[in-house]
Amino acid sequence: MRLLVQHGALPQGVQARSLDQTTRTLDMNTAFAHALNGLGTSGEWLLLGSVVNTFLTFYGWESMYVTVNGQVIDTGHNIYDEALTYFE
């Protein structure tokens, strides 16, 4: 995550809190939620999709969950309470 922030792929302050490979859950910090909420629907899709696609590709998973501080992400545009698959 640090490199993604350094290179501008993720906003400053965004960090992964934990990654549980058993449940395939990436838990992000509040800065990630703020970043998603500050974007329109398309930007939200691109940001979340980039993170999800990176992890799915790296770990060879077919799906994963992303949370913020252990909670389901609700951006007002979407509620991400199900396993996410590769974003096309």
Image (cartoon, rainbow, N blue to C red):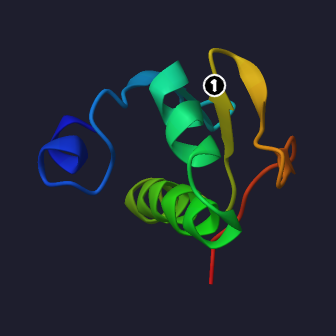
Instruction: Tell which residue pokes out farthest to the bottom in this image.
Output: 88
Name the spot of residue 83 as percent of width and height, x first. 79, 50
> Which residue is under mark 1?
68
The vertical placement of 30 against 46, above or below, is above
Question: What residue is shown at x 63% (from left), y 74% (from top)?
Answer: 87
User: In the rendered view, does 61 fall on the left or right side of 51?
Assistant: right
Q: Classify mark 1: residues with Cα within 10 Å, few (<14), some (14-19) or many (20+).
A: some
* Label 1: which secondary element: strand
Task: Classify residue 23 by image quadrant.
Answer: top right
In the rendered image, the quadrant that contains the C terminus is bottom right
Q: Amino acid at mark 1?
A: Val
User: Residue at coordinates 22% horizontally, 43% vertically from top-left?
Assistant: 5
- Seen at 20% across and 35% down, the residue is 2
What residue lies at 32% left-to-right and 43% top-to-bottom? 11
Tell me if residue 27 can be seen: yes
- Image coordinates for residue 25, horizontal then vertical, percent: 63, 33
| Along the line of sight, the residue nearer the viewer: 65 or 61 | 65
Q: Position of residue 18 (x, y in %)?
A: 47, 20
Counting from the top left corner in percent of width and height, residue 86 is at 63, 71
Q: Is residue 36 left or right of residue 65?
A: left
